[in-house]
Amino acid sequence: MTTDAPATTASDPASDAAFPRPDGADPTRPVPAWRARLQGIVEHRWFQRSIITLIVLNAILIGVETYPGMHDVGGGILHVFDALILAVFTIEVALRISAYGWRFFTNGWNLFDLLVVAVSYVPSGGALQVLRVLRVLRVLRLLSQVPSLRRVVGALGSAIPGISAIGGLLVIIMYVYVVACTMLFGEIAPALFGDLGTSTVSLFRLLNGDGWGEIVPPLQAELPWAWPFMMGYGLISTFVILNLFIAVTCEALESQKEEETELTIKEQQLMDEVLELKAMVRSIAEERRGSS
């Protein structure tokens, strides 16, 4: 017997899970008491808020260390704090692995957290000193800890097909204009449109809204119709294509909110208990049926 998941309700911010709950639990198999206690710890809102606070604090410390002379402040106390925070992150991931077992590895966000913590242990001394920059990846853990940021990232992921199609359209339009500008303005302004490479750079500057005063006036001085030609490119590329990117992303975000049916922690716990009770009733009924 199965039950339909309840409709999405307005989630309480206090009960909104910062750590995604792994899928794949077997409702017929009771959870050991020690594992249930660990799940209660890692899912507690104060535990989650403490980890988020440490992530923000770690990001600040990494930024402070970029200032000259800050490495040796207080006898290297910043390095001590950094090591302590990394140790806490390691313990937190270990607790979550212990709490969920193999189910921990069924969630992409959990794997992301594990990767970020593991990368922090990559040696960065001597010739590998440049790898110290990998420490800044810990800041990205905010993406997995804050539910609203996870929704935005999920929306961006679901919008990739639409964004790819619009990007292909933009590449085609830019190529047409690059070839046209090279043929039309190559002799007039060879520094800007002498070949396909320089034309691409010039049009990309216009796409970003930069260099209009440097690129268009020299062309207009020689060809009075150059400005409406370039204005047409600006309207098509910037005001149409780039706004399509925004429209597709906003549509994906709205779809993400409408299709979001993930239960809160308390609701999921209640559903697990109901399924366990149903499994027990089913087993008792089968025993009675067998004895009769």
Image: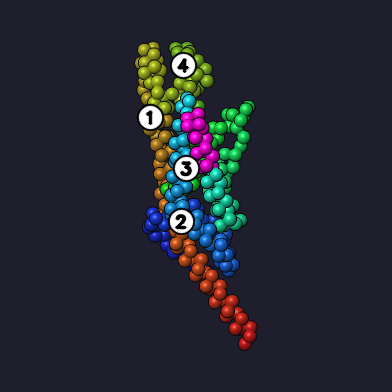
Measured in 3D between alpha carbons, the distance from the residue under mark 1 to the one under mark 4, in whole angstroms, is 20 Å
Magenta segment: does it hold 81? yes
Of residue 45 and residue 181, the one placed in the foreground of this image is: 45
Q: What is the three-letter code of the residue carrying label 2?
A: His
Secondary element under disc 1, as helix, strand or loop, is: helix
Q: Amino acid at mark 4?
A: Leu
Dot 1 or dot 4: first in sequence order is 4
Image quadrant in which you'd find residue 205? top left
Q: Is residue 88 magenta?
A: no
Residue 185: x and y in percent read 45, 16
Q: Earlier in the sequence, mark 2 or mark 1?
A: 2
For the C terminus, give its image quadrant: bottom right
Q: Is residue 131 above or below residue 48?
A: above
* Residue type beneath disc 3: Ile
- Identify the residue position indicated by label 2 in the image: 44
Q: CA distance from mark 3 to mark 2?
A: 17 Å
* Residue at image point 36% right, 22% down: 228
Toward the bottom, the furthest residue is: 292
Q: Nearer the viewer, mark 2 or mark 1?
A: 2
CA distance for labels 4 and 2: 60 Å
> Quick one: 157 or 134, which is closer to the camera?
134
Amino acid type, mark 1: Leu
**Marks 2/1: CA–CA distance:** 51 Å
The kind of secondary structure element at disc 3 is helix
Q: Where does label 1 land, which residue?
A: 235
